[in-house]
Amino acid sequence: MAKRITILGSTGSVGENTLDLIRHAKPGEFTVTCLTAHTNAVKLAKQALEFKPQNIVLSDESQKDYLRDALAGTGIEIGFGRMALIEAGRLEADFVMAAIVGAAGLQPTLAAVQQGCYIGLANKECLVCAGVLFMQCAQQYGATILPVDSEHNAIFQVLNAERPDEVRKLILTASGGPFRQFSKQQLENASPKQALAHPVWAMGDKISIDSASLMNKGLELIEASYLFDTPQEQIDIIIHPQSIIHSMVEYVDGSVLAQLGSPDMRTPIAYALAWPARMETSVKPLDLAAIARLDFELPDTEKFPALGLARNALITGGAAPTVLNASNEIAVAAFLAGRIKFTGITDCCDNVLNVFENEPGFAKPLEAIEQVLDIDGRARETASAIIAKQGLG
Amino acid sequence: MAKRITILGSTGSVGENTLDLIRHAKPGEFTVTCLTAHTNAVKLAKQALEFKPQNIVLSDESQKDYLRDALAGTGIEIGFGRMALIEAGRLEADFVMAAIVGAAGLQPTLAAVQQGCYIGLANKECLVCAGVLFMQCAQQYGATILPVDSEHNAIFQVLNAERPDEVRKLILTASGGPFRQFSKQQLENASPKQALAHPVWAMGDKISIDSASLMNKGLELIEASYLFDTPQEQIDIIIHPQSIIHSMVEYVDGSVLAQLGSPDMRTPIAYALAWPARMETSVKPLDLAAIARLDFELPDTEKFPALGLARNALITGGAAPTVLNASNEIAVAAFLAGRIKFTGITDCCDNVLNVFENEPGFAKPLEAIEQVLDIDGRARETASAIIAKQGLG
């Protein structure tokens, strides 16, 4: 029986790579049930014509006519708008790739989780903003969360989840980003252009900046903590500029198990898609002799305060990770717009966290997704207000 | 219930490390059933007094009186000689550590395999000289072979044996030995003293020389091929001087899984002892940031012909690996005695293989352990004769 696949966010990079793997898989291995996109109606229509899903959904209602024309006579059902997106998560499938970027992915992914199917998780916010809630929901409905982020996928591949007592540490690797060897002075004056030049992975603007500030690794630390139910003090971060070892697990007997590979998202996506089996990919095989050398160093937590902010957010718990994530998004946008300095990003997050810390119940476990969305929204407003008022550089 | 442990070869380095792990394990986790040694009666007596096994065996019958006196009144049964050693393998146990060095370990280990218990395999000859026979025997009697050699243990830890079709390659790492950067000229004139100075592991003389000639890696290639039922063309060898990555498995999706750790035999021994669980050890945790750098390069197969000899022995099959191993042992002894040059070791092996190649049935699968012992003996004689006649120096 073919595995029925829904892709929430099929026109982004994870979505496209997922479809590429399906395109080249053995015939009959996968069938596409539903594809969704935010605004890219042209690409969505093209994908729908190729993969013939039963349903597609576009968030952007203004493009109804274009999409209906493009798919006239195909019999593909087309939905529009936010509610249709959530409904897409509920359509019966064996595997849902949750690849919608940002807080918008939260509700559709939760809808998919409630099916109790396999979830390829590429959306960060489900774990960063709603980690406890999300994992509780997955457990309640019997969904299997298969992380697609290369670091978490690496850990998932070498973690024996059935024997948590035998795990001593999770070790997340970080490329260190383009500012790894910058001085504090250079960091202050770093431009968006410099920050966007990631040494290994070609990524979107937001994640490139997060990689430069190490906030990306901070957010991954939060994700790992919730996903693998591991306290932050048992999660190490190590700088590994070549990004060949994607992450590791240290066991009580002294063994460290690692997943390595060429930096290509198709490997973790294929692992999630085919789990518990593995599927052939055309990813360039790892050639360690050609790479010749792998380096490692401890991160400079003073130069990169994002790591400390993330650890503290985990220690505080409750809404702290949600606030950190929201304020970071606003600050990154302000940095890209030239409104604050690079070092102002973490300053902004720190300030917003300080404001929220005084709210009663801030550290209490989040209880509902509406609460997450409310705090997320208010943290964004606070961040914007702080940036507008203080300038932060 | 405590796991009942027999150690065949308890006074060697693997045996001692095994007892050290048992000594520091949780109370009630292990009980020692039987210990055996070749000649070291003093150490065996000491171990017996500490671990109180039901039986001990010493190969060397000349020390009967000493051992009986030392253990008078303990109720420990003491056996002597070769037959008692084989009987020791038959004593009921849950786990037998097969740590006898050389061809002498073959029959006791096979006796243990016929119990159908867990076998910690540290003896090379079982796989190198009798690979097909040994694995057939393990399958027939339902024994589980848990490799203790750090490379094979690493592969065992990250290999999904239930899905062999998903494995693309096994990748054995090699330190490269002390002559990695020697010229051909330097190799010819290399002294035993130079060859014994291994950069990473402290080992016995024979294995140090094998490490210098890369014959050790050649023999491990043969072991891996039989143990994991993988043809030689699917097993790569890569030089990795720091010996931190102990070996790897490459999968069809592009993932490479690796086991890393401080170079300490207690980790693979603990993994075998506790399998399918893991036990706490006091092995120094891996500190990649302190190590800072891992290097990789392809082996120079022209400078180190041992790798080609081993691959050819696997391609030929039958008695070829047995002949290679036997002739190498004789040649290494001759090199250590100053009778042949370093490069004469592989020349000798090549010559002996050429002699045996003409024997009818040379490439046919070995059918009985007696045949293995016969060929092993004759290969040694041929090697000695060649060295005496030609000098190879």
Image (cartoon, coloured by chain):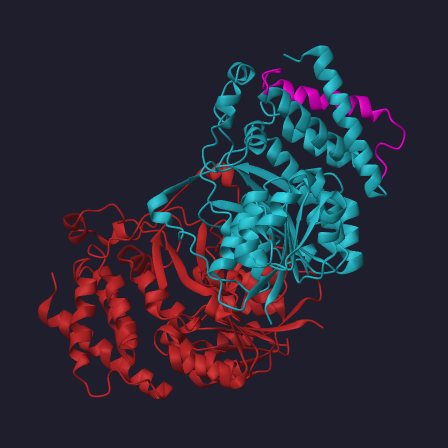
Chain colours: A red, B cyan
Q: Name the spot of residue B105 as percent of width and height, x first.
A: 70, 43
In the rendered image of this protein, does residue B78 appear above or below residue A340? Answer: above
Of residues A81 and A385, the one drawn nearer to the viewer in this rendering: A385
Q: Is residue B292 left or right of residue A300?
A: right
Q: Is residue B361 left or right of residue B184?
A: right
- Whether A181 is drawn above or below A19: the answer is above
The quarter in which the C terminus of chain B is drawn is: top right
Q: Is residue B27 visible?
A: yes
B66 and B157: which one is in front? Answer: B66
Residues in magenta, as a range: B337-364
Look at the image and tell me whether residue A285 can be seen: no
Q: Quadrant of residue B362?
A: top right
Which residue occupies 18% across, 47% down?
A183
User: In the rendered structure, does residue B295 fall within the stretch colored magenta?
Assistant: no
Q: Position of residue A54 (x, y in %)?
A: 62, 78
- Viewer-closest of A95 and B266: B266
**Which quadrant holds the N terminus of chain B?**
bottom right
Residue B361 placement (x, y as % from top left): 88, 33
